[in-house]
Every structure is written in structure tokens, then in C-alpha cells.
Amino acid sequence: MSLQEQYIFWRLTNYFLIEEGYRLIHLHEKKQELWLDNPAQKKRPVIRIQMKELSWSNVVERDIEQVMHVCEDLRKQMGRLKLSLINIYITPFKPVGDISEWFDKPLQSENEKISLDNILIDQENANEQLNQMCLDLGVPPETFHVPNELDEDRIAKERSIVINYITTKVSEEQVQARKEKPYVTYILLAIQIAVFLIMTFTGGTSNNTFNLVRWGAKFNPLIYAGEWWRFITPMFIHIGLLHLLMNSVVLYIIGPMAEKLYGKWRYALIYVLSGITGVVASFVFNINVAAGASTAIFGIFGALLYLVVLKPHVYARSLGISIAGLVVVNLVVDLFSQGIDLAGHVGGLVGGFLIAGALSLPHQYFHWRRVVYGASVILLTAFFLWFGFNKGQNPYEPQNANAVAGAFIQHEDYATAQKILQQLQSSGSADEISFTNLAIIATIKGNEEDAANYAREAISQEPFNPHAHFLLARSYEMQGDLKQALKEATIAVEQEDAENYVQYKLYLENKIQTR
């Protein structure tokens, strides 16, 4: 290529990079071809510049066909509905043959998603063609005027300006990336560690179900009763030191990577929202008390897997194998481990994938599939919430709920215990233990009539219930019916020779004798 073609090539590149803020997305010096994109001004077209000898019209045709295919791939990678491209050929001579069909008007792809404007700049008509291009692109006139005298130094200067600019930009981005700390990850780690320490000093977490539920673990009966915030709090609570350490280490490893790729606010949203989708899945499929950052961490796994789907050519090798391996290993461990909330992990994984698809990466063009991802996660979450709350209206196994309610009664939190027990009652799940606990609360509150009714219901479900007979005896005593009280107290002693039952029976006998 002559000095004129080289000058035009580097002068155009220099202007679009430095003056208009385009970024280089592809450079092939041997093929003398580059592609430019302007992320700050999305209405500006993508620009392709190539120095090439276009000797015949069929050479132009083949190249334009290839450019169309590349544009379609580029459009998908950018996530754009449509893509406009300015395709600039810098050539010594005008091609032989009729080329008007490619250069006289914009071309459209078959799916009408690619608009292609081809511009030819040949040696003989360069200044005229450059001026017309300035007019078409809204560039100041004479910006690309070719000087009358050109030498190697002038070409080298234009080229060095471009190379130095690109090198400086890359260096600045690398320095900025090194400066940026994963503060969101650090904050998340600090929150869950602080919560664990507070819970440890207020009763512990490993074997203290009461403390877990008190601090916000996922517990279905209380969610049924209206404590919706339990869809959020479980991701910051851990059941034991080992649980905390495992989740903290995994978050420390993958969190900074995801935070850097998605940016801080997107990363924080993915973490929290996918944690919620995981808890929702656990709410539907797991009746047990559950807690842990695993739902959110699997959400981050899902977000990283989304990148492999979005840009396989970029992330398949760097992320695909390692992240997919981690997910598979963790899910296999879940399948063969007791006490692991598999539903919560899968819910977080799927939620993270869909939420990442809705938010996408920073500086990405809008694409309709983001709406599809967002609508999918909303509809799925809404469906599972409806399904989960509907399950709460039907009878279910009350054992865990009774145990938690009993723990709240022991810690004198009668309001929470009553909320759990009344939910069991309203769903038809309450058994003799549930009604016995309700009778205890009513007795403590001095509601003797309610206490008697609850105790009778407990006895009707299970006649061998010494504590229910004891509570019923207390209720009869408070209502002044000592004979019925003594009768129930006697049954309590016959069923269980406990000291408090025996002493109460003696107390009633003495009270009747002294009347």
C-alpha cells in the first residue's frame, strides 16, 4: 500500500479513537483491518476500516458477505436488537466491474437487523470521497484531508499516536482495576461474621434452634404467619462455625471475580436477589429450619455461568470449566449429605443465572432477552411463593414447629410461640402437643376458659397426656370446680408420677377437706 492509503488508515483511526471516544474492539495489522465501537454514544455506528486491494467486483462481494456474518455475531455479543456498521475500504484503485449495488445505498441483512454502509476511498478520488464521508457522518469538513506531501515519518507519527493511545488506555484500565477493591464482598463477609458473633454470644447457633429462628432463620410457620422478612435474613445467618467458614471461603474466592465483572451494584443485587430466590425454593420444598449464605453464593455461581452462555468465546475457557466444576461438586455433595438445603442451592443457582441475564454486564446494549430473563425470574418467584403459601393452608407435619414453639415458651416469648401454634391450628396441622402448648400459654396469660378448651382438645387427640390433664385441672380450680380439678389431677398422676403433679393433687385434696 502507498503512503496515502497508510496515512488515511491511521488518520481515520486516530480521529475516531481520540476525538469521538471510540474503542478498539479488533485490530489485525497484517490484514490491515480494525473495528471500532463507541460505547458512550450508542447511536453512533460501529466502524470497520480496512486497507485492501479490491481489484475486482467479486472480491468486494465476497468481503461484504463475510462482513455481514461478522456483524451478526457482533450484534449478538453486544446484545443489540439492531446494528449499524460503516464499512470503509481504503484501496489504491477502484475495483473493476459494477459495484454500485454495494456502495450507492445502505445494505440490509436478511433479518433486517444489520444495516451496512460501504464507503470506498481510492487513491484518485480520496479527498472528494473523504469530504463526502465527513458530511455523511457529521464530521467537521476537511478533517481527513490528505496532505500534498507525505513521508514515512508522517505515517509513523499517525501510527504511533494510535498505538500510544491504545497502550495508555489499557494501562489505565489495568491500574484502575488493581485499585478497585471488592468492597461489596468485604462488606458481605463482615456482615455475616458480625451476625455470627452476636448470635454466638446470645445463645449460640450450632444446636440452638431457638436462637436461629429468633435471629431470622427460614422457618415456614412464621413465614406463613406473615414474617416475610425471613426470605432475606437467612442468607446472613450460619449454623455453626464450620458452616460460616465454608461459605466465607467460597465467597472470598468467587466474590471478587463476580464483583469486578458485574460492577458493585449489579453484584450486590445478584447476591441479595438470588439469595431470596434460593430461600423461596427452600420455603416450598423444605419444611425444616434453614439458614446460610449458600443460596446467595449459588446465585453468584449462576451469574458466572451466565457469562459463559453470553460470551462463550471469552469466558468458556477461563470460567466455564472451573465454575461448572464447582457447581457440580457442590450439588453432588448436597445429594449425599444430611441437613443440606438442596432446594435452596438450586433455587439460588437458577435465580442468579436469570437475574444476571436481566441485569447483564456494565456498558452492554439493551436486548429483548434481558426482559425475558427478568420476567422469567419474577414469574417463577411469584409462582413458587403462591405454591408455598398455598401449602401452608394445608396440614403438614407439626413436629418441628412444636419443638420451636416449645423453645419460645421456655424463653418466655409467648407471642411468637402463640403465632406458630395458631398457624398450625389454622392449617389443620396442630396435634396434642400443639394444643398442650397453647393451653400452657393461655394458663400463663390467665385465660382459663381458653386453657381448658385447648387442654380438652389435646386430651381428645391423645388421652395419655399427663400435662394436658394437669393444665385442665388448674383451669377447673381457677373456675372454682375443685372436684373436676381433683379428677383431672388424679389422672395426671396416674399417667405420670411426676413430683409437681403429685404435690398439686395433694394440694387439691387438702383444699377440698378444709372447705
Image (cartoon, rainbow, N blue to C red):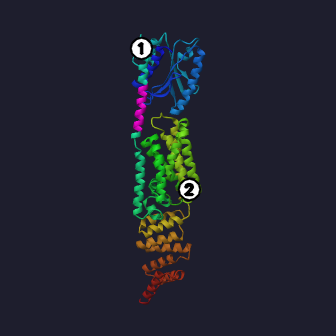
Q: Secondary structure at mark 1?
A: loop
Q: Work out whether mark 2 precedes mark 1 in sequence or the reverse, and give the earlier one.
A: 1
- Name the residue that disc number 2 marks: 285
Residue located 52% across and 65% down the image: 400
The three-letter amino acid code for the residue at tag 1 is His
In percent of width and height, residue 144 lies at 42, 16
The three-letter amino acid code for the residue at tag 2 is Phe
Q: Is residue 175 magenta?
A: yes
Q: Secondary structure at mark 2?
A: helix
Within 10 angstroms of label 2, few (less than 14), some, or many (20 or more) residues? some
312 shown above or below 381: above
- Between the C-alphas of marks 2 and 1, the distance is 70 Å
Specify whether 144 is left or right of 396. Answer: left
- In the rendered image, the residue lying farthest to the front is 153
Q: Magenta residues, as a range?
A: 163-177
- Name the residue that disc number 1 marks: 145
